[in-house]
Image (cartoon, grey):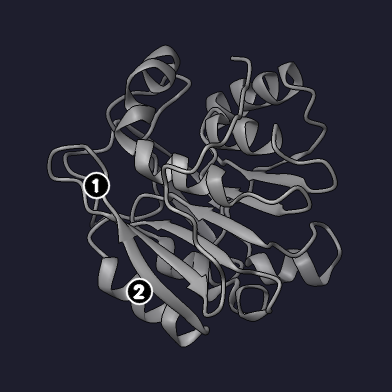
């Protein structure tokens, strides 16, 4: 499963990944919300000199592999294992398709995922703004959200941080909720565009950006390497 993510599945998101890497600045604070095994985290971190990556991943087998991959790339950052939501609460995390490391379809949502869950466990959620206010994590400048249907709750729990001028880019993967993601980002002061994902039936990723931010094309030359 992990090998499939690196060798095959990530390239379905090539336009999003190339766009993100082309816009990464050396001092960015990058939130990888739904980090899985760390592909985005490791590649973005390789472009940072004064910035940092904050990786969020709740599924324990993914967390184990994420930590190994971060360490292999010299990234010293704790993994945030509580899933982000609009408020603290005890929720149920449902697992779909596979229980192996690299599992893509774990979710707190019960509407978007198709089929019956193969397992579940109880977990406490947290609002991102609360973590920032307590000084547990730095405020973000670039955010990637891939949480299988609960992206709107993540945004609601990060309203203060996302509204700050420092936060200039948000990449939100849509799972039946593209319009809700777009409207929330626009309400927080972002303009929005979409980037297609090369996967049958997959919705485009919603990108929120600040007015006045210069956006080079996704094909801009960027060199980013990571070890897995």
Counting from the top left corner in percent of width and height, residue 127 is at 63, 67
Residues at circles 1 and 2 in contact by the CB criterion of under 8 Å: no
Q: Which label is found at residue 182?
A: 2
Relative vertical location of residue 61 with respect to residue 88 in this rendering, above or below: above
Relative vertical location of residue 29 with respect to residue 74 in this rendering, above or below: below
**Crowd class of label 1 (few under 14; some 14 to 19; many from 20; radius 10 Å):** many
SS for tag 1? loop
Q: Which label is found at residue 113?
A: 1
Quadrant where the image shows the C terminus: top right
Q: Closer to the camera, 55 or 18?
A: 18
Q: Residue 102, can we see it?
A: yes
Q: Residue 105, can we see it?
A: no
Q: Closer to the camera, 209 or 40?
A: 209
Q: Which label is found at residue 146?
A: none
Q: Quadrant of residue 79?
A: top right
Q: Quadrant of residue 38?
A: top right
Counting from the top left corner in percent of width and height, residue 155 is at 51, 70
Image point 39% across, 47% down: which residue?
A: 107
Relative vertical location of residue 204 with respect to residue 185 in this rendering, above or below: above
SS for tag 2? helix
Relative vertical location of residue 69 with respect to residue 124 in this rendering, above or below: above
Counting from the top left corner in percent of width and height, residue 75 is at 78, 30
**Crowd class of label 2 (few under 14; some 14 to 19; many from 20; radius 10 Å):** many
Image point 23% across, 57% down: which residue?
A: 111
Counting from the top left corner in percent of width and height, residue 6 is at 44, 20
Q: Closer to the camera, 109 or 118?
A: 109
Image point 63% across, 15% down: which residue?
A: 227
In the displayed structure, does residue 200 sit left or right of residue 152?
A: left
* Circle nearer the N terminus (1, 2): 1
Quadrant where the image shows the N terminus: top left
């Amino acid at each position: 499963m992990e090998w499939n993510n690196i060798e095959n599945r990530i390239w379905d998101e090539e336009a999003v990944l190339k766009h993100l890497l082309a816009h990464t600045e050396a001092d960015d604070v990058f939130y990888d919300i739904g980090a899985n095994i760390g592909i985005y985290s490791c590649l973005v971190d390789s472009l940072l000199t004064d910035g940092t990556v904050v990786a969020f991943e709740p599924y324990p087998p993914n967390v184990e592999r994420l930590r190994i991959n971060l360490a292999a790339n010299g990234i010293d950052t704790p993994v945030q294992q509580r899933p982000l939501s609009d408020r603290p609460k005890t929720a149920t995390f449902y697992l779909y398709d596979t229980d192996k490391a690299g599992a893509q379809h774990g979710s707190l949502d019960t509407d978007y995922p198709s089929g019956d869950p193969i397992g579940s466990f109880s977990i406490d959620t947290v609002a991102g703004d609360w973590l920032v206010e307590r000084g547990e994590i730095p405020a973000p400048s670039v955010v990637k959200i891939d949480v299988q249907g609960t992206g709107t709750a993540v945004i609601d729990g990060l309203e203060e941080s996302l509204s700050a001028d420092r936060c200039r880019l948000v990449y939100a993967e849509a799972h039946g909720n593209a319009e809700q993601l777009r409207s929330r980002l626009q309400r927080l002061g972002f303009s929005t565009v979409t980037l297609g994902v090369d996967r049958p039936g997959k919705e485009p990723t919603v990108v929120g950006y600040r007015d006045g931010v210069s956006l080079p094309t996704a094909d801009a030359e960027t060199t980013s390497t990571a070890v897995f």
